[in-house]
Image (cartoon, helix red, strand yellow):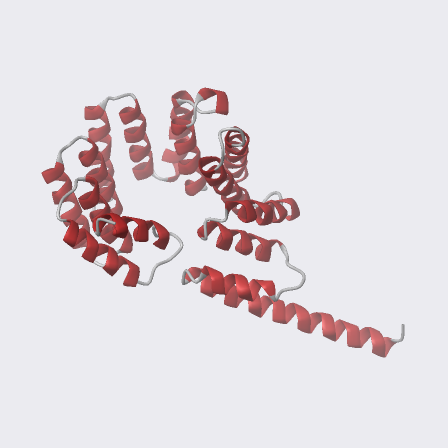
């Protein structure tokens, strides 16, 4: 091959790489705007997907509740870049959802894979708070034969505390509640609020705990405080509607809140639109 031909091919490959990068950026913007179908359409135009494109494809399928395709793409991303903690974390989440939505025959296998990838994500990045919290939740909820256990959850507390003392208080509250030590759980949640008094999320978390204890007026007070801190926060709006429906109160207001929630500019970190739509059906009595 002559020099001119090599130069031509180099230019073609460079142009293709630039185009793929632009498509990936566009797909990521659509994903962040929760236009998951649109993001997938853009990703389909990328002929040679690198690990980042495979991850984003998997994330879109995850958000669309197609957990099989999510795991397939995320496994390819993790295989291409096995030391990436984010790929392993999302793969753990996707397998966890497959376990929740599959038959009793296949669920244990998916759950075990979920645990393994959560543990790998934490091993790869000891400061990954999302991975630590998700692994804690797995240990608390999964039975022992699937690698769960309260003692394992307790072992994560020092690691969580090293990253976020507030999250460590919330984690200890979850463990105390699991032990039915409700006063101890409440003390940890109140300490979490002291550590982060300007974070609406800590008041929402406390409100959910109070609802589980049947202390509805106190839960409402904490939700009101969360609204005061962040009146337009989608998670606060969603939590208020969710609690109204769970306590079978003021369903017309819950309906209005959910309609408002669905009109807000959501992100992938907010509760899925599909969950809000299901709650809206409950509020409407359908």
Residue 109 rendering spot, x and y as whole percentages: 55, 30
Residue 230 in sight from this viewpoint: no
| Front-most of residues 253 and 286 | 286
| Front-most of residues 22 and 259 | 259
Q: Residue at x 49, y 33 (%)?
A: 103
Q: Residue at x 54, y 36 (%)?
A: 117
Residue 39 rendering spot, x and y as whole percentages: 50, 63
Residue at far left of view: 217
Q: Quadrant of residue 137?
A: top left
Residue 204 rendering spot, x and y as whole percentages: 23, 44
Q: Is residue 203 left or right of residue 250?
A: right
| Front-most of residues 259 and 174 | 259
> Taking 74 as reference, is 208 above or below it?
above
Quarter of the picture holding the N terminus: bottom right
Residue at far front of view: 286
Residue at far right of view: 1
């Amino acid at each position: 091959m002559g020099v001119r031909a090599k130069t031509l091919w180099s230019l073609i490959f460079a142009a293709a790489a630039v185009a793929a990068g632009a498509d990936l950026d566009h797909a990521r913007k659509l994903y962040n705007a929760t236009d998951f179908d649109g993001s997938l359409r853009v990703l389909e135009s990328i002929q040679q997907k690198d690990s980042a494109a495979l991850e984003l494809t998997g994330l879109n399928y995850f958000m669309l509740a197609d957990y099989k395709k999510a795991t397939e793409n995320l496994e390819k991303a993790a295989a291409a870049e096995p030391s990436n903690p984010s790929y392993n974390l999302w793969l753990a989440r996707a397998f966890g959802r497959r376990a929740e939505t599959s038959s009793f025959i296949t669920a244990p296998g998916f759950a075990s894979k979920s645990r393994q990838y959560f543990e790998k994500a934490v091993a790869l990045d000891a400061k990954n708070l999302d991975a630590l919290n998700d692994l804690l939740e797995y240990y608390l909820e999964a039975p022992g034969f699937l690698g769960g256990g309260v003692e394992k959850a307790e072992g994560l507390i020092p690691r969580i505390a090293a990253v976020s003392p507030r999250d460590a208080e919330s984690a200890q509250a979850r463990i105390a509640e699991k032990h039915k030590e409700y006063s101890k759980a409440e003390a940890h949640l109140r300490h979490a609020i002291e550590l982060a008094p300007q974070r609406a999320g800590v008041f929402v978390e406390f409100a959910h705990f109070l609802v589980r204890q049947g202390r509805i007026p106190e839960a409402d007070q904490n939700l009101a405080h969360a609204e005061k801190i962040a009146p337009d926060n989608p998670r606060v709006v969603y939590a208020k509607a969710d609690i109204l429906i769970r306590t079978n109160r003021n369903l017309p207001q819950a309906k209005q809140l959910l309609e408002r929630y669905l009109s807000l500019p959501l992100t992938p970190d907010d509760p899925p639109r599909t969950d809000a739509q299901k709650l809206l059906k409950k509020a409407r009595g359908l």
